[in-house]
Image: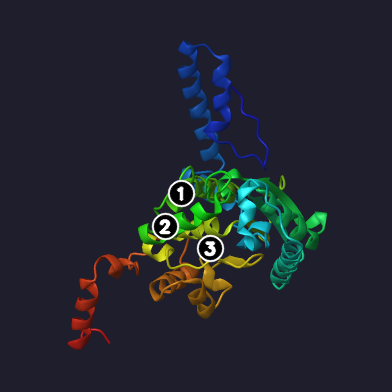
Amino acid sequence: MAIPYSSTTLFTASQFQLSQKSLSHTKSITKCCEIREQVLKFNNNNGFSETSLLHHSAALKSPRPRRIILVRHGESEGNVDESTYTRVADPKIELTEKGKIDAEQCGETIRELISKDGATDWKVYFYVSPYKRTRQTLQHLGRAFERSRIAGLREEPRLREQDFGNFQDREKMRVEKAIRNRYGRFFYRFPNGESAADVYDRITGFRETLKSDIDVGRFQPPGERNPEMNLVIVSHGLTLRVFLMRWYKWTVEQFERLNNLGNGKIIVMGKGYGGRYSLLVHHTKEELKEFGLTEEMLIDQEWQKMAKIGELNYDCPTMKSFFPHFEAEECETLYHGEIY
């Protein structure tokens, strides 16, 4: 089988595997081996070793987005009147007029944040919960961006609000929330609804999808490898806290310390020096403490800011939460002057 050649052609064995479909089962193995030998010979003759092919593949990998921006929806009718949930299905609850203004101001805030980079070719790609209030938030914040700036969007059901059950009985919900406070905010499951732990499970699936999208640059237009891409996730308060918990591997105890974002507010995961995302690229320590991060969590965010993709934090700051005797050992070492 002759292999066509040009100075810009790079062949890999996988490109020829489709030819097996036209071969019989008995001939396909022999043919595949012949093709593989020709491919290897071609690559070696033209200076493409296995190592160089791997480097070439890595070089073609799409650049990671500049940042991931998490947006909580604007003020909704349910935020100002809890009785709304007794007569309107949660997914159909709309924004208030103030909520629409919240969203428009949020869009301006995001545009200003991105524009400060000084790049001229920046774009945004949106992921949005299918609930009406989040879709309305996207519509209103999207007014800050002309069509050429929006790379695309995806409605993502896994980003929906925690399910509190169907039409809610107002007094019963007050009782259930009081029970939740005693039982634990993460594990308590509302009748006919979800716990935060249930939300964690579906957000885990979304996170894997998002990481795959980032790795292959699925939101990039064909042929483009724009490093000035910004991802915007428009969702709900608890869902966004669970997303951060899952991304940074926070414990249940750490999650339960977190506070909700305000309506129409954002929290930003900025790309650090090594390519990982850290909250400290954009936010101050004081802002993150107000959100609920502990000193241990802030230490990890510092590490995230500097670490490379694929690295592990072997000095994980949450160790002391599980093994408090480490702190006593450290104090003992300090006392004896072994650490300066």
Q: Amino acid at mark 1?
A: Phe
Residue displayed at 47% across by 67% down: 258
Asked if residue 294 lies left or right of residue 126, the reply is left
Identify which residue is drawn at 53% across, 63% down. Answer: 275
Q: Secondary structure at mark 2?
A: helix
Disc 1 versus disc 2: distance between alpha carbons?
A: 8 Å
Give, as a three-letter code, the residue at label 2.
Arg
Image vertical order of residue 291 relative to residue 132, above or below: below
Q: Which quadrant of the figure contains the C terminus?
A: bottom left
Q: Give me the C-alpha separation between circle 3 and circle 1.
A: 39 Å
Question: Quick check: 311 above or below 328?
Answer: above
Residue where numbered disc 1 is placed: 190
Query: Which residue is under mark 2?
Result: 180
Q: Is residue 255 left or right of residue 229?
A: left
On screen, residue 251 versus residue 332, left or right, reads right
Secondary structure beneath dot 1 equals loop
Query: Is residue 56 at least partly visible in the picture?
Result: no
